[in-house]
Image (spheres, grey):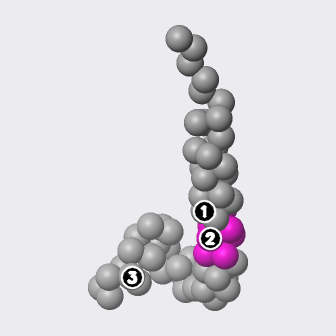
Amino acid sequence: MSIVVLPHLLPFLVGFAVLAGLALVLAVVALVATTPVVQETRRTRLRRHEGVLHFYGHLALGH
């Protein structure tokens, strides 16, 4: 009895590579989409002397 792993592992590796590529593309798109907002609100955040998490947390939650 022999165990042949490679033919059964190849579809998993291809699927994983496709999902990893998709995640990378989505991360780049999200970064590009949020960059202008971060640049526009930087002066306000610095003027208020607030940290990044504090400022955007309150901005997102409406406080």
Foreground residue among 13 and 56: 13
Foreground residue among 14 and 29: 14
Query: Which residue is depicted at the point 61% across and 23% down?
Result: 4
Badge 2 is on which residue? 26
Circle nearer the viewer, 2 or 3: 2
Query: Which residue is depicted at the point 53% across and 11% down?
Result: 1
Which residue type carries mark 3? Ala
Instruction: Tell which circle, 2 or 3, labels the residue nearer the N-terminal end.
Output: 2
Query: Which residue is depicted at the point 58% across and 44% down?
Result: 12
Few, some or many residues within 10 Å of mark 3 (<14, 14–19, 20+): few
Badge 1 is on which residue? 23
Report the span colored magenta: 24-31
User: x and y percent of residue 28 in the render?
Assistant: 69, 69
Tell whether label 2 touches label 1 (CB within 8 Å): yes
Which residue type carries mark 2? Leu
Was residue 29 drawn as part of the magenta stretch in this picture? yes
Query: Which residue is depicted at the point 65% across and 30% down?
Result: 6
Quarter of the picture holding the C terminus: bottom left
Few, some or many residues within 10 Å of mark 2 (<14, 14–19, 20+): few
User: x and y percent of residue 31 in the render?
Assistant: 65, 73
Tell whether label 1 touches label 3 (CB within 8 Å): no
Secondary structure of the magenta portion, mostly? helix
User: Please, what secondary structure does the residue beneath circle 1 have?
Assistant: helix
User: Please, what secondary structure does the residue beneath circle 2 have?
Assistant: helix
User: Please, what secondary structure does the residue beneath circle 3 have?
Assistant: helix
User: x and y percent of residue 52 in the render?
Assistant: 50, 69
Badge 3 is on which residue? 60
